[in-house]
Amino acid sequence: MLLSYMGSIAPPLLSFVVTNIDDLFILMLFFSQTGQGFKKRHVVIGQYIGFGALVLVSLLGYAGSLLLPRQAIALLGIFPIAIGVKALLDRSDDETPKLAFRSSLAVAGVTIANGGDNIGIYVPFFANYQPHQLAIVVSIFLLMVAVWCFLALGLIRQRAIARLLENYGGAIVPFVFIALGVYIIWENLT
């Protein structure tokens, strides 16, 4: 029973982690800028607004996928693979945003602007689930936003860990995207 439960929460957790590794660094940047007038709560609220918008757009894409046969949904697995391959090819790009202004809306805007990969992953990923299961997946995602915020806060206090993640975190993300795409294809063709 426990193994079955872990197997059902592992894909949403993996999907969230893979698509939000970069957000962890962005959250660290925002949290490091908090102080008078720009509070930690502004970062958390902005992250939830931005992430909520990404999930909403993904759910709309998912709704369209209900009209497709499973074999067509399997082809959507190509998108995470393409994102992973593109990330491997574009490793030299630095996507860390510069803070133009500090507010919850700034955090939300950066989260949305940085979320193209989230939508590209979530639409085909959501297509693997029935609506009642999807409610659990979205709940896990929303819980993970809080975990991500707490983790980012903790990491900005630990310089060695922050440097380690900064140096090696990006190296594994493309491969996890590719694996997620293969998973989506496999699940819908078998």
Image (cartoon, grey):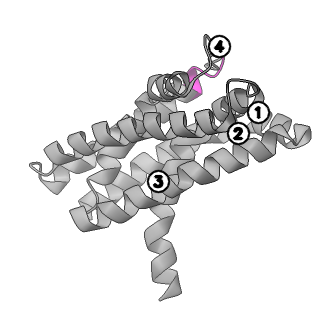
Q: In this view, does 72 lie to the left or right of 24?
A: left
Please state the extent of the stretch shown in magenta in the rendering: 88-92
Q: Nearer the viewer, residue 20 or 173?
A: 20
Quadrant of the rendering where the C terminus is positioned? bottom left
* Residue 68 against residue 94 in the figure, above or below: below
Is residue 124 rendered magenta in the image? Answer: no
Secondary structure of the residue carrying tag 4 is loop
Q: How far apart are marks 2 and 3 (CA)?
A: 20 Å
Label number found at residue 166: 1
Secondary structure of the residue carrying tag 2 is helix
> Is residue 173 among what the camera can see?
yes
Farthest-out residue, front: 37
Q: Which amino acid does label 3 sit on?
A: Phe
Q: Label 2: which residue?
A: 169
Crowd tier of the residue under label 2, counting other residues whose Cα lies within 10 Å: few below 14, some 14–19, many 20 or above: some
Evaluate if marks 2 and 1 touch, with contact meaning CB atoms under 8 Å apart: yes
| Residue 38 point in image, percent of width and height | 67, 26
Farthest-out residue, top: 100
Instruction: Of the two numbered discs 1 and 4 on the same chain, state the one appearing first in sequence.
Output: 4
Q: Label 4: which residue?
A: 98
Label number found at residue 85: none
Label number found at residue 141: 3
Q: What residue type is labelled 4?
A: Lys
Q: In which quarter of the image is residue 137?
A: bottom left
Q: In which quarter of the image is residue 60?
A: top left
Q: What residue type is labelled 1?
A: Glu
Q: How far apart are marks 1 and 4 (CA)?
A: 17 Å
Q: What residue type is labelled 2?
A: Gly
Instruction: Of the two numbered discs 2 and 4 on the same chain, state the one appearing first in sequence.
Output: 4
